[in-house]
Image: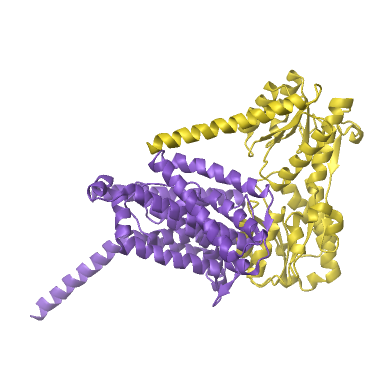
């Protein structure tokens, strides 16, 4: 009996959810203008804080310009789910498609299928490229290497200014990296290259690269293990390819009692802002990339393309290239300037 | 007479040594302890003795504390032949929920128990799906895993919630006599639940339900009631783990604790708890947990490239499953 009641309750709940979804779509369809375009965004991982903010701003931008809606598809980093989502948007005959593919090898098939279906397509964050690395569609790209360089430059200046490298034997640079995430590797490389250029005498045997998976917990474990493996190092400087790693490393340095002399640089700014509010934290700066700005620019580009026929980012087209690439960069934030630079994001 | 005495002594010695040899090679726990010892020796040598230092042992214990709490729950469930795939999601959901409560001004003394109650509710819902809808535990908890990961993102809008409550943060980073509080919580829970499993009627019922469900029914044991208690316990442990992680990181993060349940199950199986149910101890699971975390810590200290770390962890899992297979064969033979 209980089983039947539960099955019935679940069925009713499911039906209500479906009706609610259908109802809201129906209301929207009635109220939207006849020529209102349908935009879609297929994202490699909508669970990341960056993409949550980007897609929210993108949706707001297109709706403000009269779009019917922005359909969101989350691939969870799966190429398979990406292809299913692509089939779905083609079946729905969307007007403009924005993609951030989980694997850039899916670029050609994306462009080909959209061309067949007559759908305008361009990329956000990770560009659509051919086998030679040439762009085959417009893109707003986060220049990962350049973002990493901002971190390395800031750190290099900080080290030189504060003479942190006065005793090279006891100073170590931990470069947290995510070798398994291709878009994060250039961030770490950029940071390291820029730092080496700023502090050329920093001993290479005191530069340690360590992998984590992008979460605070693993950032903590990796940093704790590295600190223990190098007891001779008493002053740590560290860069991480996201704020989670930097936050985990900060907690590990605090646990080891080595935070007072340490300097940690994150990327993103979304967790850094809370560390800046503390009386003391060795999490001293972050490369801030504004997700709302990314989403807004990208959303407006979609509407410009549909309403005015302006191909996205055309003014950034370089000689020999077929499409324009918007170079999205980062700004360094620290306790002295984060409120001013981050604005509402600092709250 | 003297000769006879010598002969008797020789026979006694021989029996003693053969018994010792048998027990060393047949006892699962001794085998596991030898494996743990080998890990300690190998990594100590490779890291110039930095591995076996108090500070690193604390690192390993901290890394073990959250997985360890879930391992207690998963071990009980594996003993009754069930498994729960939702603890990672429940931990993330709980971490976000507790930080949300704190940001709304609730005291930690209210927020944490409230989240533990929510955790128990999730466990109760899981057990209902298993008991009443007769869903396979794997499927039921896989669904719960998806639901609560999604809810974790919904509750916080996909953004981490920062927390500044000093009392709450102590739960993650505080120390008592230099021992981190997460480690104290984990070891206390471990001792309590080891005693419950080994020394109480409830513990015996768990083994009977897992080892021989028919006998359990004939003995008048209410198996569904045991299921409910164990699912509630496992989810409550996951919720506690989520609160501790949030306190340690000063924020509730929806993407946290992915794969937590797999680490917990690996530790339990490595520690001798059979997938088929009815067999294993929490002591074995604890050794399995230390082998796994000790191994992870060692490869991180050696700074082995991440792709090789992934391979090494996979091999450890294969080793765990192979041990389980061979132990099963041995049990069937005996």
Q: Is residue B147 left or right of residue A97?
A: left
Q: Find residue B48 and report its horizontal and vertical position in percent.
A: 57, 69
Display colour scheme: by chain
* Position of the N terminus of chain B by quadrant: bottom left
Q: Is residue A11 above or below residue B53?
A: above
The shade of chain A is yellow
Closer-to-camera residue (A42/A219): A42
The answer to whether residue B259 is seen in the rendering is: no
Picture quadrant of residue B177: bottom right
- Residue drawn at x 54%, y 58% is B114
Q: Is residue A69 above or below residue B55?
A: above
Could you tell me which residue is drawn at 75 percent across and 50 percent down?
A: A187
Counting from the top left corner in percent of width and height, residue A171 is at 73, 69
Of the pair A336 and B325, the residue shown nearer to us: A336
Is residue A112 among the parts visible in the rendering?
yes
- The answer to which of B316 and A53 lies nearer the viewer is A53
Residue A346 is situated, as x and y percent measured from the top left of the image, at: 79, 56
Front one among A10 and A181 = A10
Chain letter for purple? B
Q: Count of labels shown?
A: 0
Position of residue A60 in the picture relative to residue A24 (left or right):
right
């Amino acid at each position: 009996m209980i089983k039947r009641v539960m099955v019935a309750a679940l069925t009713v709940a499911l039906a209500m959810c479906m009706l609610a979804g259908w109802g809201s779509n129906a209301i929207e369809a009635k109220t939207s203008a006849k020529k209102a375009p349908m935009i879609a965004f297929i994202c490699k991982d909508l669970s990341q804080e960056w993409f949550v903010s980007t897609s929210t701003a993108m949706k707001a931008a297109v709706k403000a310009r009269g779009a019917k809606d922005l359909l969101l598809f989350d691939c969870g980093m799966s190429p398979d789910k990406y292809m299913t989502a692509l089939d779905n948007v083609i079946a729905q005959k969307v007007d403009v498609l924005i993609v951030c593919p989980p694997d850039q090898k899916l670029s050609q098939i994306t462009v080909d299928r959209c061309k067949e279906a007559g759908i305008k397509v361009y990329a956000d964050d990770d560009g659509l490229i051919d086998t030679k690395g040439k762009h085959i569609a417009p893109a707003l790209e986060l220049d990962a290497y350049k973002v990493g360089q901002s971190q390395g430059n800031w750190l290099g200046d900080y080290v030189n200014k504060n003479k942190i490298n006065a005793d090279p034997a006891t100073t170590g640079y931990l470069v947290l990296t995510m070798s398994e995430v291709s878009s994060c590797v250039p961030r770490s490389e950029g940071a390291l290259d820029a730092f080496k250029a700023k502090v050329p005498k920093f001993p290479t045997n005191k530069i340690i690269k360590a992998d984590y998976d992008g979460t605070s917990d693993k950032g903590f474990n990796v940093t704790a293990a590295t600190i223990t493996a190098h007891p001779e190092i008493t002053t740590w400087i560290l860069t991480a390819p996201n704020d989670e790693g930097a936050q985990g490393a900060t907690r590990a340095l605090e646990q080891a009692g080595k935070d007072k002399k340490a300097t940690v640089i994150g990327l993103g700014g979304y967790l850094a802002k809370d560390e800046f509010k503390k009386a003391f934290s060795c999490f001293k700066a972050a490369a801030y990339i504004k997700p709302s700005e990314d989403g807004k620019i990208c959303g407006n580009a979609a509407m410009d393309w549909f309403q005015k026929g302006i191909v996205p980012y055309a003014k950034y087209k370089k000689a020999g290239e077929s499409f324009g690439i918007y170079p999205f960069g980062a700004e360094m934030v620290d306790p002295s300037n984060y409120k001013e630079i981050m604005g509402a994001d600092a709250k | 007479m003297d000769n006879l005495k010598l002969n008797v002594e020789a026979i006694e010695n021989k029996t003693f040594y053969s018994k010792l040899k048998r027990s060393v090679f047949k006892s699962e726990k001794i085998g596991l302890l030898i494996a743990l010892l080998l890990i300690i020796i190998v990594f100590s040598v490779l890291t110039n003795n930095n591995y076996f230092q108090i500070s690193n042992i604390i690192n390993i214990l901290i890394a073990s504390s959250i997985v360890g709490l879930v391992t207690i729950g998963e071990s009980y469930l594996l003993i009754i032949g069930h498994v729960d795939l939702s603890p990672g999601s429940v931990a993330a959901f709980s971490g976000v929920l507790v930080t949300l409560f704190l940001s709304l001004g609730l005291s930690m003394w209210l927020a944490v128990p409230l989240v533990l109650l929510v955790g128990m509710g999730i466990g109760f819902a899981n057990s209902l799906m298993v008991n009443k809808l007769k869903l396979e535990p794997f499927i039921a908890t896989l669904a719960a895993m998806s639901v609560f990961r999604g809810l974790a993102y919904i509750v916080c809008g996909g953004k981490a919630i920062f927390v500044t409550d000093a009392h709450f943060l102590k739960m993650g980073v505080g120390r008592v006599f230099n021992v981190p509080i997460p480690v104290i919580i984990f070891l206390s829970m471990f001792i309590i639940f080891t005693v419950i499993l080994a020394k109480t009627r409830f513990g015996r019922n768990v083994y009977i339900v897992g080892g021989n469900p028919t006998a359990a029914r004939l003995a008048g044991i209410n198996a569904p009631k045991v299921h409910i208690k164990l699912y509630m316990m496992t989810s409550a442990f996951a919720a506690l783990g989520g609160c501790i992680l949030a306190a340690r990181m000063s924020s509730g993060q929806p993407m946290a604790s992915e794969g937590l349940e797999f680490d917990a199950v690996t530790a339990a199986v490595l520690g001798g708890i059979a997938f088929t149910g009815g067999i294993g101890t929490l002591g074995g699971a604890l050794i399995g947990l230390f082998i796994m975390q000790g191994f992870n810590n060692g490869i991180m200290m050696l700074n082995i490239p991440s792709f090789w770390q992934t391979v090494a962890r996979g091999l450890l899992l294969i080793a765990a499953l192979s041990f389980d297979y061979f132990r099963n064969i041995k049990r069937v033979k005996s």
